[in-house]
Image (cartoon, rainbow, N blue to C red):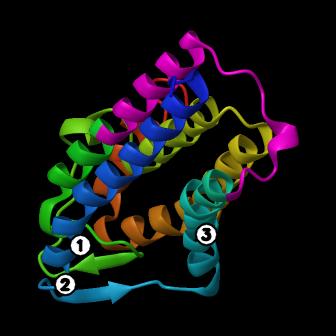
Amino acid sequence: MQLTFDSLGEILWVLGIIAWYVIRYPFERRAKRVRVVKESRSLSDSIGLAAALFGLAVFPAFYLLTDFPERADFLASLWSIAAGALLFALALWVFRISHKALGRNWSITLEIRDQHNLISTGPYALVRHPMYTSFLLMAVGQFLLLSNWIVGLVGLLGFATLFFLRVDKEEHMMLESFGPQYRDYMERTKRIIPYLY
């Protein structure tokens, strides 16, 4: 059996999703042991998380299992698979260093934890939300690795839904918790793309 660019992209995407979970799991376990002092969970927060999960994991996995919608496939090439793999690897690296920088402050939802600190070092020195940066890189990488217009667009929409439903609330919560310190930090940094946005 000959390995095609399509199947190579699919294999790399699956390995990337496994790596994503391996990175996230220990932080998720540790976070459960740190007391939450303030939370801002909402329906829109849940919708954003569900949209990201659907667009970046569930729908692409469904596509790999069923090949639906194969009519939206485009021709995979060496450059698209290489670029997709590079972007996905960069996404995983940013994801990992963001978790590491946050340490005990990390949570999957909008929460302030006991003895929460404002982190402005590591990736947080460049952008306020590097985990969203990693999801954007992951979505673009997915688009290139899976060579399907619809799967790619659903991934980007899943990321965008999460980002736009949560980022303002997240920043509002940080302003309430850290006041002028966070406002100064906002003036020094961009949201998710260094020096641009």
Q: Quadrant of residue 76?
A: top right
Q: Which residues are magenta?
A: 66-92
Instruction: Classify 10 Å Cα crowding around label 1: few (below 14), some (14-19), many (20 and above).
Output: some
Q: Position of residue 160 (x, y in %)?
A: 66, 52
| Quadrant position of residue 188 | top left
Residue at (37%, 66%) from the top-left corner?
Answer: 174
Which label's residue is closer to the chain start, 3 or 1? 1
Which amino acid is tagged 3? Answer: Gly
Q: CA distance from mark 2 to mark 3?
A: 21 Å
> SS of the residue at dot 3?
helix
Q: Is residue 109 left or right of residue 120?
A: right
Q: Earlier in the sequence, mark 2 or mark 3?
A: 2
Residue identifier under label 1: 28
Looking at the image, is mark 3 or mark 1 nearer the viewer? 1
Q: Amino acid at mark 2?
A: Lys
Q: Quadrant of residue 91?
A: top left
- For label 2, the residue is 32
Residue receiving disc 3: 48
Dot 2 and dot 1 residues touching (CB under 8 Å): yes
Q: Identify the residue shown where x is 64% and y is 67%.
A: 51
